[in-house]
Image (spheres, rainbow, N blue to C red):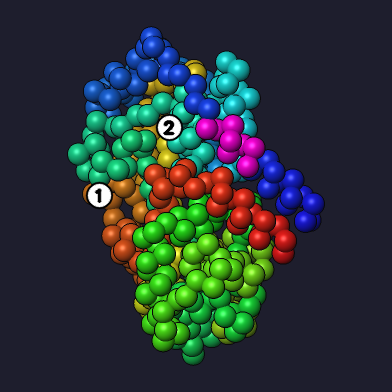
Amino acid sequence: MKKVLAVMLVLGVVFACFAGGAAEAPKQESNVQAAIRDAQTLTWDQLLEKAKAEIGDNELSIYSNSSRLNETTFTEKTGIKVKADQPDDTQVYEKMEAEIGNGLYGADVYALQDSYMLMNFAIANGYLENYIPLEYKGSMDASATDPLVICYFSRLFIYNNGKGNLKNLITNIWQVTEPDFKGIEMKSPLLEKGSMNFLITVTSPEWQEKLAKAYKSYYGKDWVNDGKFENISYEWIYKFINNCTFINKDSTIAKDIASGAEGSVGFFVYSKLRSVDYTTLAVSATEGVEGFSGLVYPFYGMVAANAKYPYTACLYLTYLMSSEGYNAIFGKDMGTYSTNKTTKISDNAKEAGDRELDFWLTTTVVEDRDYIPTVYAQAYTKIAEWCASK
């Protein structure tokens, strides 16, 4: 296992370096770019008409690292067939390079996470094109439009509360670095890019300051750099990683914690509570945690630069941004938050204790796509070494 992780470490750094060499954007507008420019001026009905004329009885192809897109509501609404494949976080970018990079058609729509690879590899190399639906542009923050952020997912500290017997287990983020919390289950940051980006974001000056405040509150003294770590964030990351047990799937972690001992803790995707009896579980964020209580990360939707059906791709992304489409695919349960401000979390999510996006943006670490590239190679190498040594 350690050898495999070591190889992944090398590949990760090489891939990061490779991603820094951005190809020049095409100077002449492509057919896909022209279709997108036109689609951004069209209403749903106008776009539907063009999409049907374009695709006929063929299938719209989607690559996404979310299983949520393997569903039928878009087809039921439009009559347009969809084929959704689910490559993992690394494979989706490998397929992108192998297909789009070599002029081969593979997919029309990419729906994916990992803002570092999206910005510094996919967009930098001209593999994906941005599209903003006319009908929802006015109900989105500018930060969610370049490129298009469909929604945010949350990854949180969740513990077994013994069906209500235990409360406020985690009140300060430094607790998860202490021996009493040994055995926290999470996916390895080497396999889960969202977790890696989370840890890299935590090294920023903003989060160093917040960790320092939480440290003083918890230990009653200022943090002093004794030379073991570059800064306070790296100390927290090192100790946290060494307290973790790496599990391959978030769904497995959810089941382990839900059926585990009172006080057992997991760091996993909140939406996985939909598949377990969550009456045994408590979300630390809703009880209040000094420092931070998890992360939220963006889930993007873009059109392939060599899409065969660009109008249809734009129609599909418009559907995802609508309240109807979002609620059908993402919004029925907890843990996902549309960037369309007119779309609120569902009653099911509220009953489970979920909150609106604004709450999570103020209580968790938000993946910082601008900061991450400035330290990626150094931070990735250090964190990956710690993960690989477990």
- Does the magenta stretch mainly form a helix, a strand or a loop? helix
> 203 or 159, which is in the foreground?
203
18 part of magenta stretch: yes
Type of residue at label 1?
Lys
Residue 258, position in %: x, y?
Answer: 58, 74
Q: Which contiguous range is marked in magenta? A: 13-20
Q: Residue at x 30, y 20 (%)?
A: 37
Residue 58, position in %: x, y?
Answer: 52, 20
Res 263 quadrant in image: bottom right
Regarding mark 2 in the picture, which secondary structure is present there?
A: strand
Type of residue at label 2?
Met
Q: Which residue is mark 1?
A: 341
> Quarter holding the N terminus?
bottom right
> Quarter holding the C terminus?
bottom right
Q: Residue at x 66, y 60 (%)?
A: 386
Residue that extends furthest to the front in the rendered view of this protein: 227
